[in-house]
Image: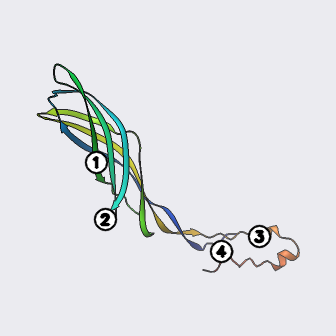
């Protein structure tokens, strides 16, 4: 009914996956603003590429800061960019070049903001999930179905159960 032999299969598969929280700080000119009243994170773009065998995530975040100088308020718009390596442990059965996929698991958010002299510093964090996809060699158990149970009469007498439908190994 079953066979304990292994069959080798080569297919594109996920050979590594990780989830990381990336943190970074963005600096912009204060433009005479003395206080930040609020931060709104807007449009976000995330991409990944491979550098020296490891995936590198690039995040672009549009951000609005509501600021005050004591007499008036003003909205400062900025685009923040962060490029960080995201280490992924790979299975050792891959063949050929890797491809990468990335997605945000939630919305990037501001974790803090401060005005220091002529600069405003905004701290961010975002959680990303990175997958590495490559041609991989997998070994799976090969099962030979028992066709003889479904055969009757002359068909059953000519059936060779030792012949593998998977070919010779």
- First reached walking from the N terminus: tag 4 or tag 3: 3
Regarding residue 27, the answer to whether it shows in the image is yes
Q: How far apart, in angstroms, are the residues tagged by discs 1 and 3?
A: 59 Å
Q: How far apart, in angstroms, are the residues tagged by discs 1 and 2?
A: 18 Å
Residue plotted at (28% across, 41% down)? 79
Q: Which residue is mark 1?
A: 82
Residue plotted at (28% across, 36% down)? 111
Considering the numbered disc 3 on the image, is that residue within a helix, a strand or a loop?
helix
Camera-side mark, 4 or 3: 4
Residue lying at the far right in this picture: please name it: 153
Is the C-beta separation of discs 2 and 3 under 8 Å? no
Q: How far apart, in angstroms, are the residues tagged by discs 2 and 4?
A: 39 Å
Q: Which residue is mark 2?
A: 52
Residue plotted at (76% across, 79% down)? 160
Q: Which residue is mark 3?
A: 147
Within 10 Å of disc 2 (Cα), the crowding (few <14, some 14-19, many 20+) is few
- First reached walking from the N terminus: tag 2 or tag 4: 2
Q: Quadrant of residue 71?
A: top left
In percent of width and height, residue 96 lies at 43, 70
Within 10 Å of disc 3 (Cα), the crowding (few <14, some 14-19, many 20+) is few
Camera-side mark, 2 or 4: 2
In the image, which disc is placed on residue 11? none
Within 10 Å of disc 1 (Cα), the crowding (few <14, some 14-19, many 20+) is some
- First reached walking from the N terminus: tag 1 or tag 3: 1
Q: Compared with residue 127, is residue 17 higher up or lower down, i.e. above or below?
A: below
In percent of width and height, residue 165 lies at 69, 74
Q: Compared with residue 132, is residue 119 higher up or lower down, i.e. above or below?
A: above
Is the C-beta separation of discs 1 and 3 under 8 Å? no
């Amino acid at each position: 009914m079953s066979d304990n032999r292994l069959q080798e299969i080569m297919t594109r598969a996920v050979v590594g996956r990780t989830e990381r929280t990336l943190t970074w700080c963005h600096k912009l000119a204060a433009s005479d603003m003395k206080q930040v009243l609020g931060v709104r994170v807007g449009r976000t773009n995330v991409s990944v590429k491979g550098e020296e065998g490891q995936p590198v995530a690039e995040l672009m975040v549009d951000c609005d800061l509501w600021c005050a100088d004591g007499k008036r308020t003003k909205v400062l718009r900025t685009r923040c960019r962060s490029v960080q390596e995201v280490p992924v442990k790979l299975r050792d059965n891959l063949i050929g070049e890797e491809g990468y996929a990335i997605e945000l698991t939630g919305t990037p958010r501001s974790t803090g903001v401060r005005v220091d002299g002529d600069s405003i510093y905004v701290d961010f964090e975002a959680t990303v999930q990175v997958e590495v996809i490559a041609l991989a060699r997998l070994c799976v158990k090969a099962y030979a179905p028992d066709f003889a149970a479904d055969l009757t009469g002359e068909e059953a007498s000519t059936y060779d159960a030792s012949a593998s439908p998977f070919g010779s190994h």
